[in-house]
Amino acid sequence: MSETTRHSRESYDVVVIGAGGAGLRAAIEARQQGKRTAVISKSLFGKAHTVMAEGGAAAALGNVNAHDTWEVHFRDTIRGGKFLNNPRMAELHAKEAAQRILELEYWGALFDRTPTGTISQRNFGGHEYPRLAHVGDRTGLELIRTLQQRVVQLQQADAAELGDPEAMLKVYAETTITELVKDGERIAGAVGYLRDTGEVVVFEAPAVVLATGGIGRSFKVTSNSWEYTGDGHALAMRAGATLINMEFVQFHPTGMVWPPSVNGILVTESVRGDGGVLLNSERRRFMFDYVPDVFRSHYAETEAEADGWYSDPDNNRRPPELLPRDEVARAINNEVKEGRGSPHGGVFLDVSSRMPAEEIMRRLPSMHHQFKELADVDITAEPMEVGPTCHYVMGGVEVEPDTGASLVPGLFAAGEVAGGMHGSNRLGGNSLSDLLVFGRRSGMGAAAYLDELGEERPALSEEAVAAATQSLLEPLERDSGESPYLLHQEIQNTMNELVGIIRNGPEMEQALEALAELDKRVAEVRAEGGRAYNPGWHLALDLRNMLLVSEAIARSALRREESRGGHTRDDFPHMSSQWRRVTLVSHLTEDGVGLRQQPLDELRPDLLNLFERDELAKYLTEAELAMADARKE
Ligand code: FAD
């Protein structure tokens, strides 16, 4: 073995790539099922999007409004996703989210309380009842803290029993996986590098769980941090798995817009959930102008009714500021386009005129701190300026709902990297509950796969390891080539400008051409410097993932000729019932990303019965509606 290809080699039953909520919950489960498990994270342990989650985790505990049940949560989720969600995933999620929150409490999570001492729940867009279990606006921090504490508990038990805290569950921080390796059709392990030394690491494992989160860094304006380059999506595709629904990207309506250095940083939906209102330059609550027909009967028509809802939700309808995110983002986009925006190209989000300063400080401490520190704005005294920011990807690895298994034997996925659960648009709060429910299920799925596998395990060949090692070292070995930073900027600009919040056919074709050109240039990218702590090299490796994911997004978005959820086309501005049951599946071909169509599973009659016929008529084709009627009879 040459000096450059020398590597350390570790062997596990299950390797979990990603240490956010989904990864930690999967790793805990696999370890609890008796499997020797590694959990790997690209950044520091505990630094993941999950820790940044502010508003809360949605679960029908029914603590604040006793009418809430899993059925209502299921209905809201399907409505939010515009009837494109995988029905089985949405059902499992709605049924199991409450158990997962209570389990967290049992493991030590300290949620905010109601006056009677139960877990408090707050309002969020698209949720019929107050449903988000929260800890002020720092919920993700408590969630990660609790899961990490559970990891430590399990490690302490292993120390006592086996003499080594890492005997059964080991964390590898600042370790990036760049390739999955297979033996024939089956997963055999993963290859990556350590950030601090650049040393190559090889993990031999028959089961790999992807829990790598999102893709936001492919867009210029994003709430996502540097790790979110779509690695898991790309690793899965390169290993032969499929992605679904990649055209659906969520632009959160409220990111910071000023100063430029913080453009895109998230302003939590809790600001609106707790009473904040959106105003245009005329200081008018413009969201009343943007309630679409499909939601009209559920939303207030006057400010008095909207304001009345906060204290008397049984006799008033919800404020339109709490429409699902896709609706609010499009409305803000339109106000700005029509010249009614704020000075820096957003709109105003005001909480200062809605509640006393002490109340704002109690409910939204992080937001107060964020605006004071980053923009010198005191949100207790003046409005914030906000605009849409790329936030979440609904599309992801196609998985079997009950186990998280992808089409590749031994490869599982959970959390944001998995597709299907949220349909065309995710409701706020449904990600934290998604990652708990499906993180656990994928850990169980991986353990069950191993039990079936028995003693006969896939082998990790030295040739495959050498090829993966070679490709990760290439950018460092080139004598010439472009800077990864410039190429990254071009990908981000292409996606933001041509495949952003409002799309059309010619622009997306232009984007695909630009991405194809960038693909050639990225193949020759050069990273200067050595292997130790070299962010330019790391970015050079991330670029090919961003490109692959961007191509999947652009191709799927060009193919879907309608507007729905996180996919809006001004050349096809309406939702089409013909497209509702079409799932676009992305897979890797020799010429890049290929697409095929497959039908979405039908809703079972008992689940269909949760909706009024009038509502179904807005989404289903005539034939589907007739079938639904026949099944109801
Ligand atoms: P993440 O928590 O994103 O973790 C991904 C992990 O994968 C990280 O450890 C990362 O280092 C690792 N990783 C990635 N690539 C690699 C690689 N190649 N090799 C090794 N490791 C890798 N959702 C809600 O439900 N409620 C909220 O209130 C909420 N607020 C949010 C606020 C912000 C600012 C943001 C950005 C998101 C928010 N979301 C919220 C969304 C939610 O936080 C995320 O969707 C969710 O946390 C994703 O969890 P995950 O476990 O799938 O991945």
Image (spheres, helix red, strand yellow):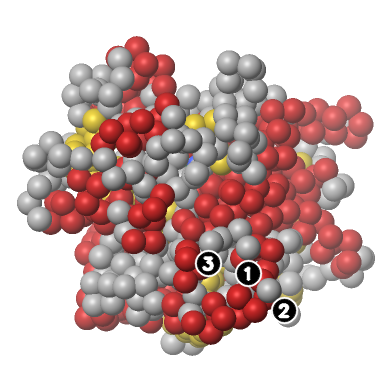
Circle 1 packing at 10 Å, graded few (<14), some (14-19), many (20+), is some
**Would you name the residue on which mark 2 appears?**
185
**Residue 24 disc label:** none
Q: Nearer the viewer, residue 631 or 37?
A: 631
- Residue 305 visible in the displayed image: yes
Q: Mark 1 highlights which residue?
A: 603
Image vertical order of residue 627 relative to residue 45, above or below: below
- Which image quarter is the C terminus in? bottom right
Mark 2 vs mark 3, foreground winner is: 3
Picture coordinates of residue 576, whole percent (x, y): 39, 77
The quadrant of the rendering that contains the N terminus is bottom right
Q: Which residue is mark 3?
A: 613
Give the SS element for disc 1.
loop
Apparent side of residue 117 relative to residue 444 in the rendered image (left or right)? left
Which of disc 1 and disc 3 is earlier in sequence?
1
- For marks 2 and 3, the one nearer the N-term is 2
Residue under the image location 31 percent in, 73 percent down: 574
Residue 482: name its quadrant: bottom left
CA gap, disc 1 to disc 2?
32 Å
Measured along the vertical axis of the image, is residue 7 above or below residue 576?
above
Does any portion of residue 219 appear in the rendered image?
Answer: no
Say which element carries label 3. Answer: helix
Residue type, mark 1 in image? Leu
Location of residue 402 with respect to 602 vertically, above or below: above
